[in-house]
Amino acid sequence: MKIRVVSIFVLALMGASQLALANTAATKFGFVNSDRIMRESAPAKSALQRIEQDFSKRDQELQGRAKELDALQKDLEDAGAKKLSESERQKKERVFNEKNRVFQRMQRDLREEINQRRNEAMASIIEKTNQAIKRIAESEKYDVILQEAVYVNPRVDITDKVLKALESAK
């Protein structure tokens, strides 16, 4: 009796392992390189280009202020050699420090606004990318599509398909 139970258990175990092997053989995997999507996709490139255009005027203004600060700093250094009076030197230092604070604040505000816009644009691109991935997965019968992996066989990389789908979705 014990031999019969053990035999049935072994047969059931072998059948289950065969079924598991059959299921994994039929599973279709894909991989998408998210970093590449963010670098190479048409929506990402156009979003970054729009951001650059939108903030270029303020960036140029900051560059002008940076040149002005450099000139003021050089003037302060030259003033030390010219032996200005203490009050005139302090006045020049106050002007320089105030302009430098305004410059630093403007620079920080610009960086924050650019980062906020970039994050908003990337969120939109991620949403579009995920929609494209889902369409590809459904149309080509993928069971699993990964976006993060340590190693990926190029055979399962569908990043080019996703890039083409994003390009055509314009």
Image (cartoon, rainbow, N blue to C red):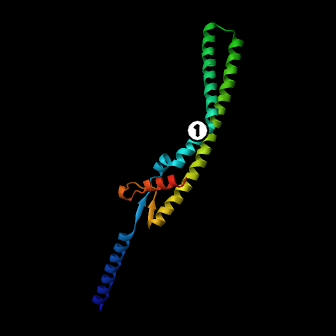
Question: In this view of the protein, which residue sits in the foreground, 141 or 144?
Answer: 141
Vertical order, 41 against 142 (above or below): above
**Residue 162 showing in the rendered view:** yes
Q: Residue furthest left?
A: 3
Numbered disc total: 1
Q: Residue at x 67, y 23 (%)?
A: 97
Q: Specify the amino acid type for callout 1.
A: Glu
- Compared across the picture, whether 11 is left or right of 112 comes to left
Q: Residue at x 33, y 76 (%)?
A: 17
* Label 1 SS: helix
Where does residue 6 sit, x and y in percent of width and height? 30, 85
Q: Quadrant of residue 56?
A: top right
Q: Residue furthest bottom?
A: 1
Q: Quadrant of residue 59?
A: top right
Q: Residue at x 54, y 55 (%)?
A: 169
Q: Residue at x 53, y 45 (%)?
A: 45
- Compared across the picture, whether 101 is left or right of 24 comes to right
- Compared across the picture, whether 153 is left or right of 161 comes to left
Vertical order, 99 against 135 (above or below): above
Where does residue 162 sit, x and y in percent of width and height? 47, 56
Vertical order, 62 against 4 (above or below): above
- Compared across the picture, whether 50 is left or right of 25 comes to right
How crowded is the residue under tag 1: few (<14 C-alpha within 10 Å), some, or many (20+)? few
Where the N terminus falls, by quadrant? Answer: bottom left
**Residue 153 showing in the rendered view:** no
Q: Circle 1 is placed at which residue position?
A: 52
